[in-house]
Amino acid sequence: MSRLAIAAALALAAVACKEESAEFAGVGPWSVTKTKLADATGRCDPTDLPDGRKGMYCYLQPLLPVAKQGADVDLYFGGTEPTAPLVELQLKVKICRPEPTETWLRSHFGAPFEIQGTRLYFKNRYLYMAADLSGDQGHCLLRVFPLSEQAELERVKAQATAPTPAKTTP
């Protein structure tokens, strides 16, 4: 093989490796592919997950920065044993600026596969993310699910598009 062919092969391999490592499996220390209940650092309480499974809800995790904004972290696990997998990571951006948050999301997770008003939905080979950037009461909510939780993503999407009941005045 010529030196040029070897250099070209190495360059292609480097690009391929870089592209593979560009996809995130979570945010900060929380990964939908690796995080287990034993990794949670805050307080955890038993809960019933929306699909009826028994799980654990963990809160009071250390804040994470999202687009230079503080985000509270809540974790949901699909079981109560220490090896239970992470089934949802919620980031509650406390004082949310939607534009920088969307820029941060796009730089980390690429283009959304669907947009519904102020809600953006992302997918890569590890996760789904539902991002509500409405800034409702100054907050944004980012929900990250492993691909195995597609039904929960669909439930979240359906909930977001459900009509809001009309308010009645006495």
Image (cartoon, helix red, strand yellow):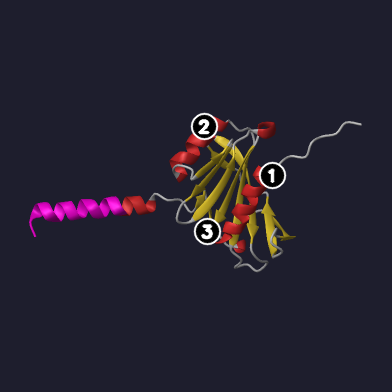
Principal SS element in the magenta part?
Answer: helix
The quarter holding residue 135 reads: top right
User: Going by the image, does 127 lie left or right of 18?
Assistant: right
Task: List the residue tagged with mark 3.
Answer: 147
Local secondary structure at mark 3: helix
* Residue at 68%, 66% in the rendered image: 80
Residue 51, how many percent across, how many down?
69, 61
Residue 154, how many percent across, how many down?
61, 53
In 3D space, how far apart are the residues under numbered discs 3 and 2 (Cα atoms)? 26 Å
Task: List the residue tagged with mark 1.
Answer: 162
Labelled pair 3, 1 in contact (Cβ < 8 Å): no
- The amino acid type, in three-letter code, at marker 3 is Leu
The quarter holding residue 138 reads: top right
Marks 3 and 2: which is nearer the front? Answer: 3
In 3D space, how far apart are the residues under numbered discs 3 and 1 (Cα atoms)? 23 Å
Local secondary structure at mark 1: loop
- The amino acid type, in three-letter code, at marker 2 is Pro
* Residue at 66%, 66% in the rendered image: 79
Marks 1 and 2: which is nearer the front? Answer: 1
* Residue at 53%, 35% in the rendered image: 101
The quarter holding residue 151 reads: bottom right
Q: Residues within 10 Å of mark 3 (few under 14, many from 20)?
A: some
Was residue 139 drawn as part of the magenta stretch in this picture?
A: no
In 3D space, how far apart are the residues under numbered discs 1 and 2 (Cα atoms)? 27 Å
- The magenta region covers 1-16
Residue 47, how many percent across, how many down?
73, 60
Local secondary structure at mark 2: helix
Task: List the residue tagged with mark 2.
Answer: 100
- The amino acid type, in three-letter code, at marker 1 is Ala
